[in-house]
Amino acid sequence: MAGFTCSAADLRPLLGTAANATAAAEYICNAFDTVSNKLVAATYAIDNTYLLFSAYLVFSMQLGFAMLCAGSVRAKNTMNIMLTNVLDAATGSLFYYLFGFALAFGSPSNGFVGRHFFGLEKYPSPSGDYSFFLYQWSFAIAAAGITSGSIAERTQFVAYLIYSSFLTGLVYPIVSHWFWSTDGWASPVREGHLLFGSGVIDFAGSGVVHMVGGIAGLWGALVEGPRMGRFDGDGKPVLLRGHSGTLVVLGTFLLWFGWYGFNPGSFLSILKTYEHTNYSSYYGQWSAIGRTAVTTTISGSSAALTTLFGKRLLTGHWNVTDVCNGLLGGFAAITGGCSVVDPWAAIICGFIAAWVLIGCNKLAEMLKYDDPLEAAQLHGGCGAWGIIFTALFAKKDYVNEIYPGKPGRPHGLLMGGGARLLAAHLIQILVVIGWVSVTMGSVFWLLKVFGLLRISADEEMAGLDVTSHGGLAYAYHDENNDQSEKNSFPIANMDGSNA
């Protein structure tokens, strides 16, 4: 409706030669303009409400991360890992508000870094509203949450605060500028020249979010080294099992739920029609959003079942933790191409993602690499596969719907679109690995040099809950304590007398 106007001068001849024709034309145009403005306002309201709701869903993933992390570590470190998840969100809020959002989306800018909206100055603007900031913030703290799992159970508390601030305030925002901003050098929505004629189609962040968080965690765990007891004297891996499968499953379901804001929400708006489609008026962006939710579901489910039977063949067990991680690996992989592939392709995405995760975990054991949450393997490895998957299976019709105005834009190699999109995506993998390795690798190395990274051996043996957080997360009672309590508090018989 914003493109329609009403002119009294054009309308008056259509009303005849009546004396009041001019007044009638002006009245009709005024009424039309009022209705048009209301419809435009309603469109903004609906789209912003949709984006806010999606932001709330993505933020709920922080609870999922917290539960998953808590269940995956030993009980003596539960309070520590829970607190780090809270502070990832709190620290990320301030640093993304002060610096991160501007570096990511501060347009107009150059192709490498944004330069407006520091501290949300002069924002909202024609480029976005507060809902857009909140949505992007929820992505930034998700990347920081991924990293915290890799360095769990052996990291000083101050190190969490420093790396989280640096990641959400600088490292992640610059990557998101490259691939998501309208000015980014590899963005598919930039004006002018596109990388290989397509830009990088990383719709919801297999590379921007998952690879960034996973590679950062990789360097943190490499610099720190494995936990005490993770490998025996002969270098063979020793399983340090997390203390609660219940929390792992709860966290997985919460993350699954939040992913419906992560992937479908990345459309940023819902009330939009698609022109030149083979469908009727019932088909629009709302349909693409529904398809994205379906591909997300199918990929995760495919990965979960593949992991279930794959690990059964390899180990002889039906392991719930492995299945949960496989499910999440399928989600991380489909995130980049969730909007531009068919549901049948999502089955392939999840199937291969499961084997990528299994392979990365096997390689990690061979290299004596210790990641309690398998975060680097899951988000880094499966995220990289997702980037390649998109370049292979992106469908032409869907690409043109979501990224219009560029006729002949490359699409998936296996869908007849040539190799240009794949070339762009291989460059994305390389630059993300390079940028995050240089920045976050340096941060973790400096923390180690200044003695701020790893806790002492005594603290690690006792557990961080006792040494750093004032006590254990759970209250334990042995039989002697229970008996003492019974003696101290006599139990009343049914007649009211003491037993």
Image (tube, grey):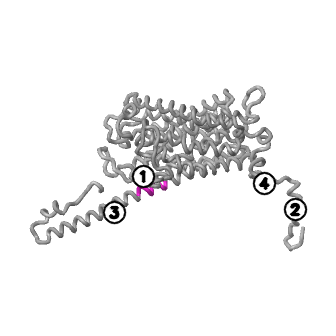
Q: Which residue corresponds to the image point at 39% horizontal and 49% vertical from the top-left?
A: 287
Which residue corresponds to mark 2?
Answer: 486
* Picture coordinates of residue 191, whole percent (x, y): 36, 40
Q: Identify the mark nearer the N-term, 3 or 1.
A: 3
Question: Would residue 67 be seen by someone viewing this image from the given angle?
Answer: yes
Which residue corresponds to mark 3?
Answer: 38
Q: Nearer the viewer, residue 412 or 91?
A: 91
Mark 1 and mark 4: span between their CA atoms? Answer: 48 Å
**The quarter of the displayed image where residue 486 is located:** bottom right
Q: Identify the mark nearer the N-term, 1 or 2.
A: 1
Question: For the residue marked with disc 2, what is the amino acid?
Answer: Lys
Question: For the residue marked with disc 3, what is the amino acid?
Answer: Lys
Question: For the residue marked with disc 1, what is the amino acid?
Answer: Gly
Which residue corresponds to mark 1?
Answer: 128
Mark 2 and mark 3: span between their CA atoms? Answer: 70 Å
* Picture coordinates of residue 302, whole percent (x, y): 53, 39
Which residue corresponds to mark 4?
Answer: 475
For label 1, the crowd category at 10 Å Cα-Cα, with few meaning under 14, some 14 to 19 and many 20 or more, is few
Q: Which residue corresponds to the image point at 33% horizontal and 60% vertical from the top-left?
A: 39
Q: How many marks?
A: 4
Q: Is residue 49 magenta?
A: yes
Q: Identify the mark nearer the N-term, 4 or 2.
A: 4
Q: Which residue corresponds to the image point at 69% horizontal and 39% vertical from the top-left?
A: 453
Of the two numbered discs 4 and 3 in the rendering, the one whose residue sits closer to the viewer:
3
| Secondary-structure class at tag 2 | helix
